[in-house]
Image: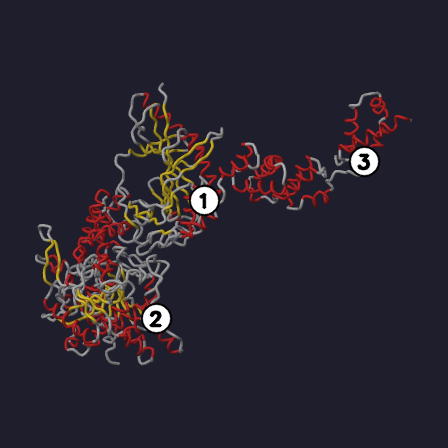
Amino acid sequence: MAEYEVTIGLETHIQLNTITKAFCSCKADSWGDAPNTNICPVCSGLPGALPAANKAMVEKALILCLAMNADINMTSFFDRKNYLYADLPAGYQITQNDKPIGIGGYLDFQMDDGRPVRVRIDNLHMEEDAGKTRNEGDIRLIDMNRCGVPLVEMVTQPDMHSADEAATYLIKLRQLLRWLGISEANMEKAHLRCDANVSIRPKGQVKLGKKCEIKNINSIEAVRTAINYEIQRQIKEVEAGNEIEQWTIEWDNDALELRKMRSKETAADYRYFREPNLMPVVISEEFLQSVKEGMPELPLARQKRFETELGLPAYDASILTADRETSEFFEEAAKVYGEDNKRVSNWMMNEVLRIVNEKGIGVAELKITPSNLADIIRLVDKKTINTTTGKTLVDKVNDSGKDPAALVKELGLGLVSDDSIIREVCEKIVANSPKEKALYLGGKETLIGWFVGQVMREMRGKADPELAKTILESVLKAGEGN
Amino acid sequence: MSDLTSLTALEQAKLIREKQISAVELLDQTLEQVKRVDGRPGSLDFDHETEEDKHKVHAFIILTEEHAREKARSVDERIAKGKSVGALAGVPYSVKDVYCTKGIQTTAASKILSGWKPPYDSTVIEKMDQADAVMFGKVNLDEFTFGGSNETTAFKPTVRNPWNTDRVPGGSSGGSAAAVAANEGAISLGTDTGGSIREPAAFTGVVGLKPTYGRVSRYGVIPFASSMDSLGPLTRSVSDAALVLREIAGFDPRDSVTGKVSVDNYLEELKKGVKGMRIGISQDYMQITYMDDNGEYASAPIDPVLLAKMEKAISIYKELGAEIIEDIPMPNTKYSVPSYFVITRIEAYSNLQRYDGLKYGHSTSRPVTDMYDLYYKSRGEGFGYQTKLRLLTGLFASQEKFYEKYYGRAMRARGMLRNDFDNAFNPQGKYRLDVLLTPSTPSAAFPFGGATAKDSLKMQFADQFTSPMNFAGTPGVSFPCGLDNEGMPLGLQAAGYDYCESKILRAAYAFEQATIDEDWRKVKPMVLK
Ligand SMILES: [Zn+2]
């Protein structure tokens, strides 16, 4: 079997999380609404209605362009893409054709093994969504709630060479979108949609193979599976001596199979022309500057900085920058703690993220604050509590929202470091254990551990074990002279 | 009370506010007038034209009597109680049937929209309501405004010219022009994409104002070519046009092309006169330029009577202290008609895609095999011949492979045409015009069927002097200037620069006042005799 090189390009549709739709004042999110209840004359394309562009859409699209390192068209235009379909009530979609808001750009990311990948972007443009079509037997049902929802369509260059790379690109894109706060990026809710163009060619061949487009892939796992299926299908065709035809294929995620939708003989003619009802999108220098100033540090840069400046291992840095809230929580805790960032990282990954996973919530929803976490680590450092108590204290603080030190006091979790109390217990234990005392004094010094254990049991773990050990030694040896 | 329907809106409003007449009384008289002159309304269930039809105006598609009576009563009540009312309180007006009216059928004179009742009012209808004007009916037009004679309407009988019912009223706002000329309301609201307000205004001897693109919100008005559609009033006096514009103009967040430019008190502005104004004349507006069978530009003269009217207007303006600047070069005027053809058809094709027989309006009752079959049959039955022609040419010209050949070139021609206006009106430029004076049309209203007859240049190019302003986005007002040798009205146009409606209205008003006692003004349309 010959070796093949796989080439993949992705077209993603990103639903921006604006409050209202792209060109009218209907709310953008119709999740859970009855069909055709969140519509108005504008988004349902009634005669005479006119679009008015939502500024928030432009701002969010601009943020994405900057994050993707794209060139910004300071003047971009809306165009009409004309086609007839029942879920497109005006008979055209308002989109950006030849002068979109963003041109070029790229996304850098690391694969799990640390290998860097750069995926270049062809362009980013704003457009409105179409409605939803559902077929029920012979009947076609149209829901226009989604009509006019703002999207950014982002098209990559064919820069990915495995299903894994494509899936990782999407994971990183999803991370970025949420990081920027411009999309919920939930693939199951179609906030992030993906079509994949897949082709293969024998290794060494310069010309790209004919590509097939897989539509309707709505989860990261489906992207991985569908692309791998398609690669296998294309290899099988080529090995059997057949030509790859340029198909559009639909991925059925329930049946786990690819289904041919249509052959692409000729590209459709969308008769693009400028949308006369909208003014050009003009981005002023001031606006661009204010958006730039509001840009957060991006995930990869922050990951790198956690490694280089904060001295975290690559693994820690990658986990702690999985989302913006986690990274910010960690960095704040590390700042308050002020020393040994790795120690904070351990507590963060082992305890805080454990709670997040157990509860299935986001870091933003935690009651425990970064400075609470720093306080807890310090309490352990100062031996006010031991490590085990520290771990349960993280849960207790998060459940109650109370201050860690106050909770230690309230629940009596503090280690007893009062000499006289521990001495009293030590003397009692030694007095009640003459046999062990004799053995110890006879040279079996390892028995000191057993004595410490007895003291800790008696004091329900609250004694400072180091202190108990010292006192026990003195108590045991004090009896020696008698 | 004597005949109230021949009064201007300004006079009517004054009488109502002074409680000399009631709004209901005026409405009744107006409806009476409609009954007297209009004949049966335009309808889809039309069989053939009767002898009686040929002598009536047929401006209306529907009368909204109940709606109007309710509004008129509320105006009367408020006036009786001493409450404040709008500037057009109690004045009946009609509206071209492309303005969406909530709960009232809106047809665009097409079968494809039959039965559709919009769930919303257009911005201008809302503004007229706030001014307390009384909408009493919706008037006929060319189907989807595609035409200049009103003959393409699907609602027959078609509108006839009140001056001579054998002549067309012009179009596409033919119903509006005819209604106002026949005293069926002092105001009608029209739309103008290439001359559709100004041409019928000239043909029926009324005032027709096409404001700057962006001066009046287009929200809720069924579009023809969205980059050129303008809305404005047709009235019997310049003052009325100024008054209505003041009420309907202004920025609208629902129409992105409206400008945040303050609205003048146009009515007050009229009094300033034309003294010191720079009024330009261009030879490019004194002849018809067209492409002959060999594809060469050729020219043909306009009606000599019109030239005489121009001369007379010039001497009046001179007397009033205006400065006349001759030979303003507008060399790209000749590109107007062909580029207009391309751009409007491409935009119209796209705008009309939504009529699919699925969501509203006409849907085929024949059996269909699938969704597309439903589209084909419904559209095939619903659109008229002229609309289909425009859709086909739009479909042809909008193909991606022809983008440069047609749309690209037409857009460049549009830019050149706009330059002509910038050169003429630029306050720092060579000519610094306030007003460009032109004939509104190359001739008076033509007989029915004229536009398709042989040797019909003047009719085919009826919008050559008006469509450049739609391209440039600048304002123009057509006002009556006399009658031709057959007793048909003629119009002149005062064209201006962006948002300079005050100036063109001042020029029109000055002419109107200077000629107010002339004999031709005493001649009444045929249907009023
Ligand atoms: Zn809406």
Q: Residues within 10 Å of mark 3 (few under 14, many from 20)?
A: many
Chain of the residue on which disc 3 is drawn: A
Q: Nearer the viewer, residue A156 or B273?
A: B273
Q: Pick the quarter of the image with the C terminus of chain A.
A: top right
Quick check: marks 2 and 1 in contact, CB under 8 Å? Answer: no
Q: Residues within 10 Å of mark 1 (few under 14, many from 20)?
A: many
Q: Position of residue A60 (x, y in %)?
A: 43, 47
Q: Is residue B298 left or right of residue A84?
A: left
Q: Which residue is mark 1?
A: A183
Q: Which residue is mark 3?
A: A422
Q: Which residue is mark 2?
A: B132
> Which of pointers 2 and 1 indicates the residue nearer the eye?
1
Q: Is residue B328 visible?
A: yes
- Evaluate whether label 3 is on the same chain as label 2: no
Q: Residue B107: which numbered mark, if any?
A: none
Q: Is residue B112 above or below residue A222?
A: below
- The kind of residue tagged 2 is Asp
Q: Quadrant of residue B227?
A: bottom left
Chain of the residue on which disc 2 is drawn: B
Secondary structure state at the residue bearing disc 1: loop
Q: Quadrant of residue B23?
A: bottom left
- The kind of residue tagged 3 is Ile
> Which of pointers 3 and 2 indicates the residue nearer the eye?
3
